[in-house]
């Protein structure tokens, strides 16, 4: 995200809208190292760490999930 648009709660508003709009019990994402703290603050939990090999470099990301308490049958 561009530095001029940080700390405006845009991402938080987007994720909140999506979670309320989509009728799902569970949400998941592959979060970068940078995005991980944001998703943790939104209630996501790390399920596993992934190592991706790209152009002779190893990149780390995280598979994260959140259970939507409002949509539990």
Image (spheres, grey):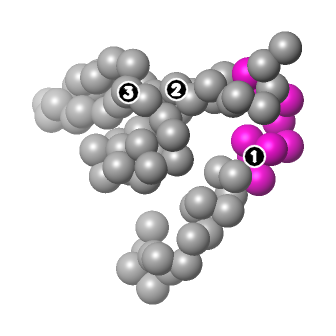
CA separation in Å, label 2 and label 1: 14 Å
Which residues lie in the magenta part? 17-25
> Helix, strand or loop at disc 3?
strand
Residue drawn at x 17%, y 31% as measured from the top left: 58
Q: Is residue 54 visible?
A: no
Q: For the point 52% across and 26% down, which residue is it?
A: 65
Circle 1 SS class: helix
Report whether 36 appears left or right of 16.
left
Q: Quick one: label 2 or label 3, which is nearer the N terminus?
A: 3
Residue 50 located within the stretch drawn in magenta: no
As drawn, the label of residue 65 is: 2
Q: Which mark is residue 39?
A: none
Q: Quadrant of residue 53?
A: top left
Q: Position of residue 52 (x, y in %)?
A: 27, 25
**Tag 3 or tag 1, which sits nearer the N-term?**
1
Q: Residues within 10 Å of mark 1 (few under 14, many from 20)?
A: few
Q: Quadrant of the C terminus?
A: top right
Specify the label residue 46 is tagged with.
Answer: 3
Mark 2 or mark 1: which comes first in sequence? 1
Please tell me whether mark 2 sits on a helix, a strand or a loop: strand
Residue plotted at (39% across, 79% down): 3
Q: Is residue 24 magenta?
A: yes
Q: Whole-Å distance between the Cαs marked 1 and 3? A: 20 Å
Q: Quadrant of the N terminus?
A: bottom left
- 15 relative position to 19: left or right: left
- Report the residue that reaches farthest toward the top: 73
Q: Which mark is residue 18?
A: 1
Toward the viewer: 24 or 68? 68
Disc 2 versus disc 3: distance between alpha carbons?
7 Å
Residue 5 visible in the displayed image: yes
Q: Position of residue 26 (x, y in %)?
A: 66, 23
């Amino acid at each position: 995200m561009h530095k001029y648009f940080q700390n405006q709660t845009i991402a938080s508003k987007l994720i909140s809208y999506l979670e309320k709009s989509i009728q799902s019990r569970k949400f998941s994402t592959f979060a970068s190292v940078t995005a991980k703290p944001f998703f943790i603050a939104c209630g996501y939990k790390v399920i596993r760490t992934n190592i991706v090999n790209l152009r002779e470099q190893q990149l780390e990301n995280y598979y994260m999930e959140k259970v939507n308490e409002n949509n539990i049958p």
